[in-house]
Image: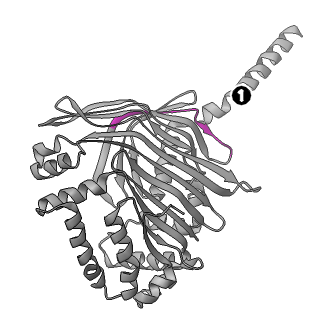
Amino acid sequence: MRTTRTTGLMLATGLATLALLQPAMALDAEAFVDRIEAVYEVMGYDLSFGAATLDGDTVTVDGVTVAIVGLPEESYAFDTELTFTGVVEHEDGSYTATRLTVPDVDTQFATDPAGHLTLTGMVAEDLYLPPAGETGAEHLLQTVGRVATGPLSITRDGVEVVAFESTEITSEFTHNDDDTLAGIVSNLAISGIWADLSTVKDEEPEAGAIIEALGLTEIDGDITQVLNWTMGDGHLVVEEFLFDFTDVGALNITADISGFTPAVLDKIYAMQASELDPASEEAQAQQMMLGMELLQALSITSAVIRYDDASLAPKLLDLFAAQSGTDRASFVEGLKTTVPAMVGEAGIPALTDIVVPAVNAFLDDPQSFEIAVRPPNPTSLLVLSAAAANPAGLISAIGLSVTANQPAQ
């Protein structure tokens, strides 16, 4: 009786252990990377991974070749180990992974002059692969929560010429009660960008002379973007897309559009994944049809491009004046006499009335310059395209404004 009980206990313990180990045992490394290839193919990428091995919940892959679907001849091979940690296959057939890490890059890419590149801290986090067959845009938009790198450094003959401190792209997802995707808030930051442009003169003497005259032998700055996107109505707001460089200026692009739903994105993905020759008549016809559908689906509330000067514009005016053999004030007055004729070539008097005063104000005192489109009501791009047949009417339809030295709205 004792032997029977012991044997039964051992059997029960073994079965329990097997049950606990089942998720890990069910995980297949090759199936995991095959799913990655299938998911990203829908987005227009042709990935071909090397051998994949499994250790617990870690999948290690021996390199990857990346190409664009339909352009296999333009492929790039990355001969480096990729490590996915925290990989889990779920009951619905989807996969998640906590992190993808890529070894630091330290490589020479040119010999004359000697070019060397280092890039560290490359990671992707909160990875998601939808179940087989579920490759709609709603799923694909959630494939990664964060991508980041540490410092980049590029040297030329041992001297650093380009660098940045870090890059980071994050996406926060919200969901409806039925677990469908409700919205995305995305942030991009490329911080501590720096470049030594003094060596440009070695290859392009004329360009190098201009760079030195403008005092731009070194530049530094940051690039940031903030984006808010709701899925139900396709309301996409680019709150900021800012290129901000010290002693140069800041260029910011903002936009507010609606109708950019996952269904619209699905059509774009289908076009990207098409194996048709892009130059073929069939492919061009499909692109034209897609373009018409996008024009009809998307509506614009506003779009603004704004430049805030940080000393670049006065330096340019001084440089051009010197090249013309005159002083800046005379050069500016000469420019102001030519602007009306240049804008007038469009044959739209209303455009001249909008553009010329702003250009003149900026030339007199370069602080900021802004071009904005703000229709009286959100208007589809298709309607605006039709209005383009009457350029004067189009200006009113899109609410075009051009201003200088005014505070940002």
Name the residue nearer the viewer: 392 or 213: 213
Q: Residue at x 59, y 55 (%)?
A: 139
Q: Residue at x 76, y 25 (%)?
A: 16
Which residue is most to the bottom? Answer: 390
Q: Which segment is the magenta one?
A: 79-91
Instruction: Based on the picture, tell me whether residue 30 belongs to the magenta stretch.
Output: no
Q: Main secondary structure of the magenta part?
A: strand
Q: Is residue 279 above or below residue 141?
A: below
Residue 375 picture quarter = bottom right
Which residue is most to the top? Answer: 2
Q: Is residue 287 above or below residue 318?
A: below
- Mark 1 crowdedness (10 Å alpha carbons): few <14, some 14-19, many ≥20: few
- Element type at mark 1: helix
Q: Is residue 343 above or below residue 177?
A: below
Q: Which residue has dot 1 on it?
A: 20
Q: Position of residue 229 (x, y in %)?
A: 60, 59
Residue 394 picture quarter = bottom left
Name the residue nearer the viewer: 228 or 246: 246
Residue 134 picture quarter = bottom right
Name the residue nearer the viewer: 102 or 66: 102
Q: Position of residue 163 (x, y in %)?
A: 32, 36
Q: Position of residue 200 (x, y in %)?
A: 16, 45
